[in-house]
Amino acid sequence: MELCKINSNASDEQCASMLQAVGDALYAMGGKCKLRIIIALFNGNKRFNELQRTINGISARVLSNELKDLEMNGFVERNVNAQVTPVTVVYELTEYSNTLEDVVRSLSEWGAMHRENIKQQTGKK
């Protein structure tokens, strides 16, 4: 799909479709920390407190809300083991979350490039 640019070959319908698709993606993955939670879980299943320690600056309330949203959208699975005392809850990624691998890689590369760009711009001033 061509990006919507001035003088491009993309039609208004294609642009509208792209805007809707990006809106859907941002709805599912937007929020303060959803992608950071998914990245943390790419390294393996984690309990709630492990996730909170891994993701700097996230409050328990935000983490809890983001995990609920991720579970609702099919990216994270919450597994409760009631056969041990105390009961343990472990969060893990679903197969569907693997569809985000290229997105996360691209965002990571762009973020590193952007950080360098900002460093260079502020270093020149």
Image (cartoon, grey):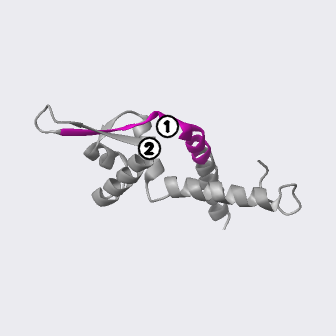
Disc 2/disc 1 C-alpha distance (Å): 7 Å
What residue does disc 1 label? Answer: 96
Residue type highlighted by circle 2: Gly
Label 1 Cα neighbours within 10 Å, binned few <14 / some 14-19 / many ≥20: few
Using the image as rendered, state which of residue 53 and residue 98 is in the foreground.
98
Lateral position of residue 107 relative to residue 65, left or right: right
Question: Residue 75: x percent and y percent?
Answer: 44, 43
SS of the residue at dot 1?
A: helix
Residue occupying image coordinates x 39% and y 47%: 71
Question: Residue 114: x percent and y percent?
Answer: 63, 54
Using the image as rendered, state which of residue 91 and residue 36 is in the foreground.
91
Tell me which segment is drawn in magenta: 88-108
In the image, farthest residue toward the front: 13
Question: Residue 16: x percent and y percent?
Answer: 72, 61
Residue type highlighted by circle 1: Tyr
Lateral position of residue 60 relative to residue 85, left or right: right
Lateral position of residue 54 relative to residue 4, left or right: left
What residue does disc 2 label? Answer: 74
Residue occupying image coordinates x 70% and y 55%: 18
Question: Is residue 58 among the parts visible in the rendering?
Answer: no
SS of the residue at dot 2?
A: loop
In the rendered image, residue 41 lying in the magenta stretch gets the answer no
Pointer 2 or 1: first along the chain: 2
Residue occupying image coordinates x 80% and y 62%: 12
Question: Cβ–Cβ below 8 Å for labels 2 and 1?
Answer: yes
Classify the position of the C terminus by image quarter. Answer: bottom right
In the image, farthest residue toward the bottom: 125
Secondary structure mainly formed by the magenta segment = helix
Lateral position of residue 122 relative to residue 85, left or right: right
